[in-house]
Image (cartoon, coloured by chain):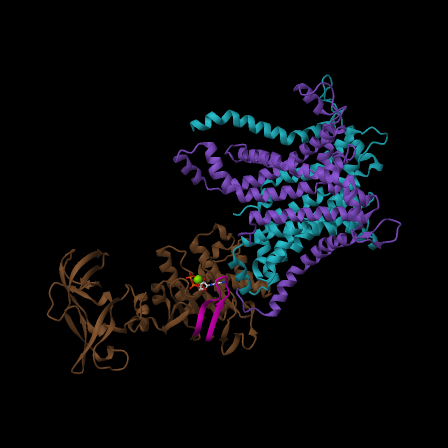
Amino acid sequence: MNLDFRNVAKTFPSFRGAVPAVRDANFSVGDGELFILLGPSGCGKSTILNLAVGLERPTSGEIRFDGEIVASRERGIFVPPGKRNVAMVFQGYALYPHLNVRENIAFPLRVAGEAREEIDRSVARTASMLGIEELLRSRPSELSGGQRQRVAIARALVRKPRLFLLDEPLSNLDAALRAATRAELRRLQRALGVTTLYVTHDQTEAMTLGDRIALLRDGRILQTGTPRDLYEKPETPFAASFIGPYPMNLLKAVLEEEGGVRFVRLGAERLPLPPDRVPGERRPGSRNVLFGIRPEHVRAVPESPEPAPRGIVTAVEHLGRETVVTADIGGASLLAVAGEGTWKEGDIARLEIPMEFSHVFPEGDDPS
Amino acid sequence: MGGDRTIRETLRGWAFLAPLAVFILGFVFVPVAGTFIDSLHREVTFLPRAFIGLGNYRSLSSDPWFWQSLRFTVLFVLVSVPLELVLGMAFALLLHRPSRARGALRACVLLPWAVPAAVSGRVFELVCNFQYGPANYIAERLGLTVGPVNWLGSAWGAFFALVAGDTWKTAPFVAVLFLAGLSAIPGDLYRQAAVDRAGPLQRFTRITLPLLRPVVVVALLFRTIDALRVFDLVFVLTRGGPGGSTTSLSLYGYDAFAGGDVGYGSAVSVVLFLVAFALSAAYVRIGRFGRGLS
Amino acid sequence: MNGEGRTRLPYLAAAAAMTAYCIGPIVFMALTAVSRRPDFLSPGAGLEFTAAHFLEVLRTKSLHFLEYFRNSLVVSAVSAALSVSVAAPAAYAITRLEVPGRTAVLFSALAVSMFPQVSLVGYLFRLMTSLGWINTYAALVLPYTAWILPLSLWILTSYFSSVPRDLDRAALIDGCGPLEALRKVIVPVAAPGIFSTALLAFIFAFNELLFALMLTTDHHARTIPVGVALFEGLHGEIPWGAVMAAATLSTAPVVALTLLFQRRIIQGLTRGAVKE
Ligand SMILES: Nc1ncnc2c1ncn2[C@@H]1O[C@H](COP(=O)(O)OP(=O)(O)OP(=O)(O)O)[C@@H](O)[C@H]1O
Ligand SMILES: [Mg+2]
């Protein structure tokens, strides 16, 4: 199924006045796609999910399922959640505590009034798909977090929903279980081919799981794209610092032009910028920009043949596989993950910056 | 779910509230309004109903029995409520202390609350009985009295019998409320206070009482209103006697109804209603109720 | 632990005194009911057991004790059930549906519980008389239900608001309408709370005196508290043994319920009064 958000806004009334939780959201999720809503706490992810599922109504704009409007205030259309054939996995799982696992999974089918044998068959099939056949007689309170999670997923998937929604489903699991469940969710989602909207604030989860990601901040969608797009072509400093294993280095710099070639002045060095790296119209003269480079691309080396800024090492973190070096270059600090040699505080390092991986953002676009 | 709701949804919400509203309107608000209206009428069995304005109230104001019952009711509130709160607090502190028998103790304390006031009225009637009542042996054994006393035959005796009966039945309820309040106070506070070298008395006055304040206000409100409208115990234990000295406002109103003068009884009820209403309003103001109740 | 040892004796004494104070009158009532003479405590008298008072109360047709008992059970049970089933949807609307005016409803209900009963009873008497319902179950059940509703509403609201919102959201997504979500999810999940509420409602109705006094006239609808309150001897002398036997029998159901469900009752009573 296709899910479409067109100019959707949601404002909550509150004692402080109206709180805009979602502003002008536009995106569409293709059939069978796993679409991720990623963003920091309070940015409106859950609100978008609730709008899609029908637990909230949009203040303006419209939501479509396969082109058909399910919610639009202007047109006075609102299909209640029970009629949308959507399924949701809640962060706290929301298992019915008074029902055993079998009845939890069977619940949506019973409400729909399906035949007994049909229900038994669907429950058995879904339970075996998630490997929870032995748990069917248990009560939710007797299950571990991971088991509850599976039951919640089984309950959501049992009736073949058109749209599958998950609100931070992994945040209550420990790290090992989280990775395993993530992989399994991916497998299940592929196997079933169900259109999925998935909320998380964890960029790793988003990058490993998503077909596409919408990055949100303050109720606004900043950028939509594949994980690779977001990693390689962040459109804002916020995206650059939010996505990736480390926040991107963002340094105030001056953009200069000389003989048709652009340079970024970093400390004492002038680094030439490849032509495809400069955003905006070509304006002559120098201007202030934010220069971005991912720590995983910066190499700290003792000596370099190329123009590489010099920095004083201020911190060294050994993370096992890699070493993170923080260096001070002219008052700004720069993280470098790649590199060679052993470093200690106070060392002088040359920081090699591969300019083909660099980003330039107009200044004033604060990343925080 | 915020705004953006439809009229249909609002109507559905009201539909859920409708049965409740019907019951409370039909069997509480309408009767109360009816009582207000009746109080402005001559509404006496066998006589035609007639509007007499404030006539019933004028009669009330010159009716010594009415003033007597008002006096009794106020005195009853003033004596029994503080007694119940103090006793309830003592019980709550006892029940709060960890002990193996805590569950059993709590059950014991809850029992008087569950006993119908009609029953406890009869029991206290027997306890105070001139001939058979143990109150006399006990008082005599303790050297408080010489010879049998007819407790219920004297105004003061009857008054104290009522206070004793009411306190017996309701101090436990107060204790249960206070106990819940006490359990909600984090133990860390006491440990901290102990570290700060606060003695038991200081801990009680500096921590327990201030933190218990909201519960105390609730208990005070409930108990004041209940004592103000006391009926069951008075009806059963003293029947308002001797000589009308322990007739509460509720009983005085009831007696008028039972005697066939609905108009007059209604006027008495309206006075009681207004007093109760004014008092609750005052408490709600002072206690700043509902801060976080919903 | 030293401090505790020092206060242990006074504590035990105080606890014993409290227990004696609370159950003393009840024990006295029960003993009088089984004692041949009511003044068994007086010097020189003694406790001689007899079942005669109980038998008298149960066997004397003209006392109608068993009928009162039945009336009380029926009226209280029906009122409790009715008030809980009326209060439950209202509590659902108040905690879940965000209906405009819900706080007003909650607080008017609270206000109602401050009304003096006597300010309703005169009009109720006229109303029931004109409907021809005096001395019927309906004359008691309807006012009782309304009278207990605020309490039920208040307690249920507090229980419902402690049921996680996501549960009924899940139910809505799973295809339930609001009424189904209430019936299939909230009510079962809040079942212990609903039970406590019903229990309290039952006890309140069972103990009620004034309405029953005004609105019933004889054993067809009269309840136990009225029966006990009006229990007088035929010959001027009050038959204390029989009165206490009747009192004991009437107290037995509520005492049994209280002992069995002590925790639930305390929880229900303190809901709303104490913030948790
Ligand atoms: N029912 C509501 N009433 C008022 N404001 C609300 C309501 N629900 C959400 N909000 C506000 O809308 C904004 C977005 O909330 P939302 O729950 O969608 O954030 P989120 O991205 O899911 O955050 P989190 O990661 O913490 O779950 C927040 O500022 C929140 O306070
Ligand atoms: Mg959220």
Residue for point 19% across, 57% down: A314
Q: Is residue C195 above or below residue B238?
A: below
Q: Is residue A274 visible?
A: yes
Chain letter for the cyan part: C
Q: Quadrant of residue B187?
A: top left
Residue A202: percent from left, percent from top: 36, 62
Q: Is residue B80 left or right of residue A224?
A: right
Residue C232: percent from left, percent from top: 81, 33
Q: Nearer the viewer, residue B234 or A117?
A: B234
Q: Quadrant of residue B250?
A: top right
Q: What is chain B's hue in the picture?
A: purple
Q: Is residue C153 above or below residue B175?
A: below
Q: Where are the magenta residues, as a range? A: A3-25
Residue for point 51% across, 32% down: B99
Q: What is chain A's hue in the picture?
A: brown
Residue B13: percent from left, percent from top: 62, 63
Q: Is residue C31 above or below residue B119?
A: above
Q: Is residue C135 visible?
A: no
Residue A20 inside the magenta-drawn segment? yes
> Which quadrant of the render holds ligand 2?
bottom left
The image quadrant where one finds the N terminus of chain C is: top left
Residue for point 71% across, 43% down: C206
Residue A204 inside the magenta-drawn segment? no
